Amino acid sequence: MRRRGFTLIELMIVVVIIVALASMVVPRLSGRTEQAKKAVAKADIVSNISMGLKLYELDNGNFPTTEQGLNALVTIPTSAPVPNNWNGPYIENIPTDPWGNPYKYRSPGNYNKATYDLYSIGKDAQEETDDDIKNWK
């Protein structure tokens, strides 16, 4: 009676194939973490937080001031100009960027003078550097 199963050589061949495939895939995935973080920050800036800001502006006729900040999207501001038609919260919570820093908000903006500037200071946590992700060019 012959036993059925895999021989040691067959198992070693499978392990070698798996290692070869992994050695081809892993280098392609390295560096993608930073790229994914940038994509998340861009989505927050261009879509998620911006949608809340647009809804706020639609209800109240203006964007929150710099002093009121993004918190105006979650709780009704008490500083002037106090919104009369606040119908929030406009977003569930104020997210931090993928590097754990708060998003920066300025209204009226230095770059978008009629609306607002919204940006992440990026991985280096320094303003006005190449890794900043912003809603202006």
Image (cartoon, rainbow, N blue to C red):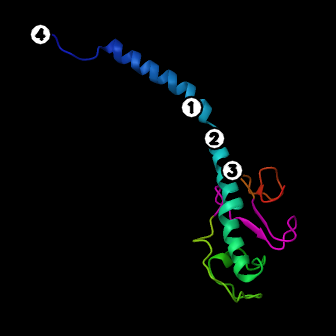
Label 3 and label 1: CA atoms lie apart by 20 Å
Q: How many marks?
A: 4
Q: Mark 4 points at which residue?
A: 1
Q: Which mark is residue 32?
A: 2
Residue 20, horizontal then vertical, whole percent = 51, 21
Residue 122, horizontal then vertical, whole percent = 73, 54
Whichever of callouts 3 and 1 sits on the residue coming sooner in the sequence is: 1
Three-letter amino acid code at the position of disc 4:
Met
Three-letter amino acid code at the position of disc 3:
Lys
Highlighted magenta segment, given as a residue range: 96-120
x 24%, y 17%: residue: 5
Residue 97, horizontal then vertical, whole percent = 66, 59
x 16%, y 10%: residue: 2
Label 4 and label 1: CA atoms lie apart by 44 Å
Whichever of callouts 4 and 1 sits on the residue coming sooner in the sequence is: 4
Relative placement, left or right, of 102 versus 130 is left
Q: Mark 3 points at which residue?
A: 38
| Res 4 quadrant in image | top left
